[in-house]
Image: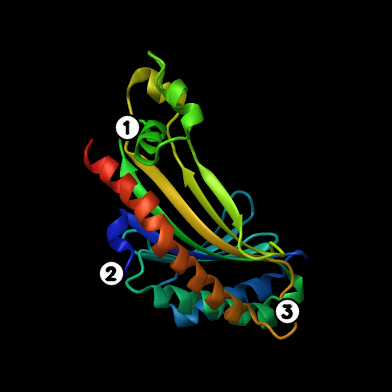
Amino acid sequence: MNAYSALADDCYSNMNLSTEMALPTNRETILGFFERLQKSYPTMRNFYTRDNGDLVLEEDKDQGHQRWLSIEARRINSGFVNPTDLDEALEQHRLVLQQVPYMLSVSPLDCEALDYMMGFDFTYSGNHDALVAEALGTSSAMDGLLEMPGTEVLSFEPSITLGLEESCRRQARLMIETRTNAYQVRRGDFPEELISVYFTVRQYGSLEADASFEETLVSLREQCEELLDAFVIEQVLRPLAQAISTK
């Protein structure tokens, strides 16, 4: 498995390209784009339309790993859940980006934002928000609230966004998503659900005249992994995994 697989129950690599202009909706154009990806990845054979109109092509979900691709009105998304090697996921994302200028008429000028995201899911049956607060801690300003007798944490989803250079066009965002609600806390009945950690490095705006989508994505991936290795693994992922293992 890839270098991050042991850190969580599931780990995934996503690429998202948001455009300023609406993407083509012509049937022949869209099917031709999906068929080009299926030619490289024949196991991506499940094609469907979501209720909101998004178009999806994906592998079967029962293999332990899954490639997927979706097109929204102004966004193209590529993902690989539990890749054996993260280079395989990057190869998929790069293939998508190589095709979009020719098959979907998306140029680097039309780029609103390009993301490289690593996601991590932890399965946990219990109060997600209380666990995150326990594992990661809170600021001293909140300690008193947590220590009040008879209280339960109902929402604690820390997130932070950082500008990575002076123009703030390149940013990194760490976000934690919990799935516990007040009804579950009141009843003390917690189904087994996922706590998700998302770490994204994003490039905003049109790309430089001599830059390509693929080159920019490689740079985003390198920076994402550098920051993950330096900060996120030891300060966020391992504490969450350790807190779950003790419950």
Q: Is residue 200 left or right of residue 76?
A: left
Q: Which residue is mark 2?
A: 1
Helix, strand or loop at mark 1: loop
Residue 106 visible, this angle: no
Q: Which mark is residue 54?
A: none
In the depicted structure, whether residue 183 falls above or below residue 98: above
* Pointer 3 residue: 208
Report which quarter residue 86 is drawn in.
bottom left
**Amino acid under label 2?**
Met
- Residue 51 at x, y = what percent? 60, 49
Whether pointer 1 and pointer 3 mark residues with C-beta atoms closer than 8 Å, the reply is: no
Locate residue 34, reporting x and y percent: 56, 73
Three-letter amino acid code of the residue under disc 3 = Glu
The residue to which callout 1 is attached is 126
Residue drawn at x 38%, y 44% is 194
Mark 2 or mark 3: whose residue is earlier in sequence? 2
